[in-house]
């Protein structure tokens, strides 16, 4: 019971920090301290807790390279003129009354190709956000559409790391899982498209900053060559080249283009990759075209270290036994899915990453799916843990894309597709349960 109240206090602390704009690492450190004190009082030694926290944090180290590379991709694409070119041509090609819907679909398409929500948000998503900064489009609605689109592909792309992880954990076939996900995602996708179409009509892309295209062609040499880093990343993804290698090659191409087409010095481009891009000249687009850089992602890496330490300590000290006892009481299929949803939300909140949300949810719910088909367990994890993690303000699944898009947690109410998936599926299960006697043993 003491740990239960401690977790409630920690949860309130995290919520307050989000609403007050406090850097999330500070309340996470407070959470780590509170949980550690409770567990020390229960008899665990400092050495044991340190060992559990360090071992768990080490598992997140491979993620750091991806995060840092995303920061470098974003800033070098700006320096190369790749992002400005996408913005410039996008303004001319996307119909103003379809802009938010088009953003959802375009980001979903790119994410499906490259298999990473972070990469999709940091490339096409960032370009769309910059495109809208000179207009009346609500930035939070747009960010919600972009991030929802990013997870549309992340959820059901054959190159998605989360899809591969769940297939491995549940011992299921990846492509059969993808087929099931497409089926269960049809109605949420259609409803989300209708909602984003309505918001597109409410917030059309009426550019108030008419100098944006002129300023872009003034400061950048825009041609098809500058789109090469984006094209290269997409082609390598289709060829199933490993994500880090693809991003490194794309960064290399962007650096060469920045040197020879945009006439930046090598020192400048490397500085952009490290610290983020910003135009030196005074211009109306100076405050629009900026961001990226590996340094911005270092803060996110710090959050990952702390959050994974918390998750490791909680799991290693068997702090979830009370939850497991409660789960044994579940009898109906709708109740099972609802519990999986709630467990995934809690895991995403206290694990602070999509990967940990998947791992904790699988660990806690595994016993309740013992008599179900493994494909059913895999599908339920995909329809809960994968899509709900971005809706937790301090979870890096939503925090990283929001950081890249230069926005904050206020995108969450508008990421409709993400919470429509579990909501629609639960309603379908509830309706079936009323007409049949779906029970689990």
Image (cartoon, rainbow, N blue to C red):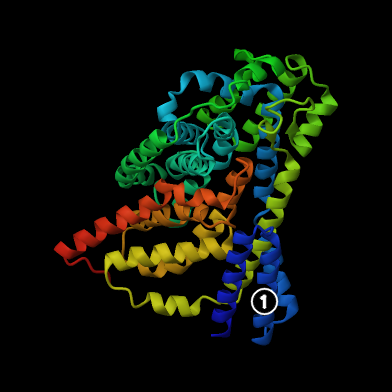
Percent of width and height locating residue 169 = 47, 56
Tell me the element at label 1. Answer: helix
Residue farthest to the left?
Answer: 435
The residue lying toward the viewer, choosing from 359 and 188, is 188
Question: Residue sitting at 64 percent across and 67 percent down?
Answer: 310
Q: Seen in the image, is 196 located left or right of residue 226?
A: left
Question: Residue sitting at 62 percent across and 12 percent down?
Answer: 223
The residue lying toward the viewer, choosing from 24 and 113, is 24
Residue 355 position by quadrant: bottom right
Percent of width and height locating residue 309 = 66, 65
Residue 370 in sight: no
Q: Is residue 107 above or below residue 329?
A: above
Q: Seen in the image, is 218 located left or right of residue 230?
A: right
The residue lying toward the viewer, choosing from 196 and 303, is 196
Q: Seen in the image, is 274 located left or right of residue 23?
A: right
Residue 103 in sight: yes
Residue 104 position by quadrant: top left
Residue farthest to the front?
Answer: 208
Percent of width and height locating residue 396 = 60, 52
Of the 4 image quadrants, the one containing the C terminus is bottom left
Residue farthest to the right?
Answer: 267
Give neighbour class at mark 1: few <14, some 14-19, many 20+ (Cα, 10 Å).
Answer: some
Percent of width and height locating residue 271 = 81, 33
Badge count: 1
Q: Is residue 322 above or below residue 206?
A: below
Label 1 sits on residue:
34
């Amino acid at each position: 019971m003491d740990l239960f109240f401690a977790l409630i206090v920690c949860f309130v602390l995290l919520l307050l920090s989000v609403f007050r704009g406090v850097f999330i690492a500070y309340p996470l450190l407070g959470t780590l301290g509170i949980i550690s004190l409770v567990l020390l009082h229960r008899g665990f030694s400092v050495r044991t807790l340190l060992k559990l926290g360090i071992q768990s944090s080490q598992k997140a180290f491979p993620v750091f390279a991806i995060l840092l590379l995303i920061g470098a991709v974003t800033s070098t694409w700006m320096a190369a003129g790749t992002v400005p070119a996408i913005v410039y041509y996008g303004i001319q090609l996307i119909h103003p009354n379809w802009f938010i819907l088009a953003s959802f679909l375009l980001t979903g398409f790119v994410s499906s190709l490259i298999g990473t929500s972070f990469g999709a948000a940091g490339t096409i998503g960032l370009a769309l956000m910059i495109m809208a900064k000179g207009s009346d489009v609500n930035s939070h609605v747009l960010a919600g559409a972009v991030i929802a689109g990013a997870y549309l592909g992340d959820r059901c792309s054959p190159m998605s790391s989360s899809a591969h992880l769940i297939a491995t954990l549940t011992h299921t076939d990846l492509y059969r899982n993808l087929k099931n996900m497409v089926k269960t995602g049809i109605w949420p996708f259609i409803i989300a498209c209708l909602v984003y179409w309505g918001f597109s009509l409410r917030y059309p892309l009426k550019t108030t900053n008419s100098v944006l295209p002129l300023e872009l062609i003034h400061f950048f040499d825009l041609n098809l060559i500058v789109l090469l880093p984006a094209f290269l990343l997409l082609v390598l993804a289709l060829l199933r080249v490993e994500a880090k290698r693809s991003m490194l090659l794309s960064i290399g191409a962007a650096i060469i283009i920045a040197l020879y087409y945009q006439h930046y010095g090598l020192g400048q481009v490397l500085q952009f990759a490290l610290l983020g891009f910003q135009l030196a000249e005074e211009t109306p687009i100076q405050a629009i075209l900026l961001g990226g850089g590996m340094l911005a992602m270092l803060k996110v890496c710090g959050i990952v270290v702390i959050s994974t330490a918390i998750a490791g300590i909680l799991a290693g000290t068997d702090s979830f036994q009370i939850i497991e006892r409660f789960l044994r009481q579940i009898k109906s299929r709708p109740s099972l899915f609802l519990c999986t949803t709630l467990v995934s939300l809690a895991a995403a909140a206290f694990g602070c990453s999509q990967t940990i949300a998947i791992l904790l949810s699988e660990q806690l719910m595994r016993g309740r799916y013992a008599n179900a088909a493994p494909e059913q367990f895999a599908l339920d994890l995909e329809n809960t843990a994968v899509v709900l993690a971005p809706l937790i303000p301090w979870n890096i699944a939503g925090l990283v894309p929001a950081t890249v898009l230069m926005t904050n947690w206020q995108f969450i109410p508008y990421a409709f597709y993400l919470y429509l998936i579990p909501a629609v599926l639960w309603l379908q299960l509830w309706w079936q349960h009323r007409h049949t006697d779906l029970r689990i043993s």
